[in-house]
Image (spheres, rainbow, N blue to C red):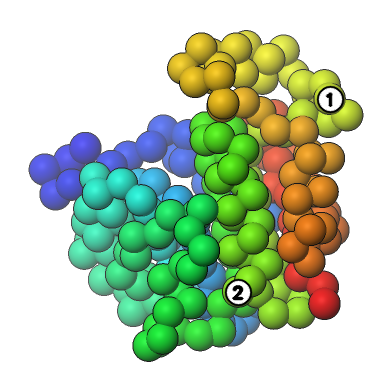
Amino acid sequence: MTNDRRIFAPATARNREAIRDCLTARLPDTGTLLEIASGSGEHGHFLTPIVNLNWQPTNLLEEQIQSVEAWRAHEERPNFLPCLKLDAMADVWPVEEKGYAYHPITTVFNANMIHIAPWGVCEGLMRGAGRILKDGGQLFLYGPFRMNGEHTAPSNAEFERWLTDQNPDFGIRDIADVEKEGKRNGLKLIESCPMPANNFIQVFQKQV
C-alpha cells in the first residue's frame, strides 16, 4: 500500500488488457456498472477512462474501501463513484435502497471472489444480481473455474489445494454449479471468454 492508501494488486496489472478487451466489447453505453468486491479499486482506475458507464465500486473490508477512495482521489473522474460497503450475501444491497442516485444498474462485474469465499457468497451474488438487473442486463464473473469437474490446468489444482488449506469452504467452483445458481435467479450463461493464467470471464444475461 502507498502512503495515500492505494493498494496495487499484481494480478490486476497482469490481466488488465484482457479484462478490458472482453468487457469493453460487451458493455452497454448507458447506466451504471456495479462492481462487487472491488478489492484495490484498480479495475475502476483503468476502465473508467474508456467506458461510458458510471462505475460503482463496492467492498466489505474497510482497508479496501479506503484503497478505492484513494484511487478515486488520484483519478478524479466523475463516473468513478464513491465506494459503497456491500456484503454480497445481504438481502438488500445499498444500490437497492431508496435514494440511490445512479440507476439503472445495467451491468454487474465481479472478479476473484467466489473461490476465496464460502459457496454461500456465490449464492448471494447470484441472488443480488438477479434482483437488480433488468431483462438483458449482464453479469461478468471473472476467475478460475472447473469444467465438468476437472481443473483446466495443473496450476489451478495446486492453487485449490492452497485455498482449501486456508479454509476448507474455499475452492475453485465448477462452472456447471455456478450456471445452475444463475438459472435459479434468472441469469443465463451466454458466453465464456478465456483469460490469461487459466481464468475466464463468464458472461450471464438476465432473462425474464
Residue 176 lies in quadrant: top right
Residue at 21% of width from left, 64% of height from top?
73
Mark 1 lies on a secondary structure that is loop
Disc 1/disc 2 C-alpha distance (Å): 30 Å
Looking at the image, tell me whether mark 1 or mark 2 is earlier in sequence order.
Answer: 2
194, above or below 166, in the image = below
Label 2 neighbourhood size at 10 Å, few (<14), some (14-19), many (20+)? many
Q: Can residue 50 be seen in this view?
A: no
Residue at 25% of width from left, 60% of height from top?
69
Question: Which of these two is toward me, 26 or 104?
Answer: 104
Residue 84 lies in quadrant: bottom left
Q: Can residue 128 be seen in this view?
A: yes
In the displayed image of the protein, which residue is found farthest to the right?
148
Residue at 70% of width from left, 33% of height from top?
173
**89 to the left or right of 161:** left
Question: Which of these two is toward me, 94 or 68?
Answer: 94
Coordinates of residue 205 in the picture (x, y in percent): 77, 66
Residue that numbered label 1 is attached to: 149
Quarter of the image for the C terminus: give it. bottom right
Quarter of the image for the N terminus: give it. top left
> At label 2, which amino acid type do we have?
Ile
Mark 2 lies on a secondary structure that is helix
**96 to the left or right of 155:** left
> At label 1, which amino acid type do we have?
Gly
**204 to the left or right of 86:** right
Coordinates of residue 40 in the picture (x, y in percent): 35, 46
* Residue 132: numbered disc: 2
Label 1 neighbourhood size at 10 Å, few (<14), some (14-19), many (20+)? few
